Amino acid sequence: MNRYQNVPKSVYQDLYNLVQGKDYFVLTTNVDHCFQKALRADNTFVEDNGWHIAANRYQTFVRRYKDLNIVYLELGVGGNTPGIIRYPFWQMTYKNPNAVYISINLSEAYIPTENKKQSIGIADDIGEALRLLQNCHSLCGYILQTPTSNTRL
């Protein structure tokens, strides 16, 4: 696949539909340009001025919800960069009894023992899992923000 071409699946649109109207932040290590089409690479990481601005917004978001109801939704994070998304999500879930950690990963939907009571592991295709989450809103209302809930996804 050409990394500058849009992906043929509806995963990104389904993800947006799931979080639309909620306070959310997308943190990605993908360099497929599906979230941001124009980055430059330096000798340490793929970053530009926009990346630094987004990093500051992310830290502000994390500070704002550190003790509140929040869902950390990890989609397909593998073993190459766990220190950017996976490990911090585990730590933030562990430190916040109001947090829920969800891992959707075809082969690595691992849940740490310390976080089992606050976590959901879904070993499935991300696209299928997102469609199921959208379709089960009445069953999964505790995960998705509803008018009577302040949980953030």
Image (spheres, grey):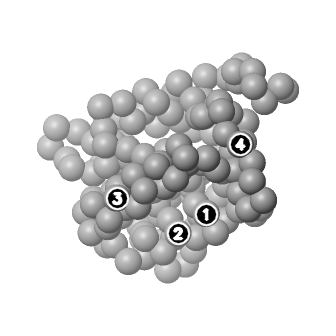
Q: In this view, does 101 lie to the left or right of 39?
A: left
Disc 3: which residue: 60
Disc 4: which residue: 40
Up-down: is 14 above or below 103? Answer: above
Q: Which amino acid does label 4 sit on?
A: Arg
Q: Where is residue 50 in the image (x, y as percent from the top left)?
A: 53, 43
Q: How crowded is mark 3: few (under 14 residues within 10 Å), some or many (20 or more)?
A: few
Q: How many labels does the image show?
A: 4
Disc 2: which residue: 88
Up-down: is 85 above or below 136? Answer: below
Tell me, yes or no, if residue 136 can be seen here: no
Of circles 2 and 3, which is in front?
3
Give yes or no for contact between labels 4 and 2 (Cβ–Cβ under 8 Å).
Answer: no
Q: Residue at x 52, y 53 (%)?
A: 52
Disc 1: which residue: 84
Q: Residue at x 74, y 62 (%)?
A: 44
Give yes or no for contact between labels 4 and 3 (Cβ–Cβ under 8 Å).
Answer: no
Of circles 1 and 4, which is in front?
4
Give yes or no for contact between labels 1 and 4 (Cβ–Cβ under 8 Å).
Answer: no
Disc 4 secondary structure class? loop
Give yes or no for contact between labels 2 and 3 (Cβ–Cβ under 8 Å).
Answer: no
What is the CA distance from the residue labelled 4 to the residue labelled 3?
A: 24 Å
Disc 1 secondary structure class? loop
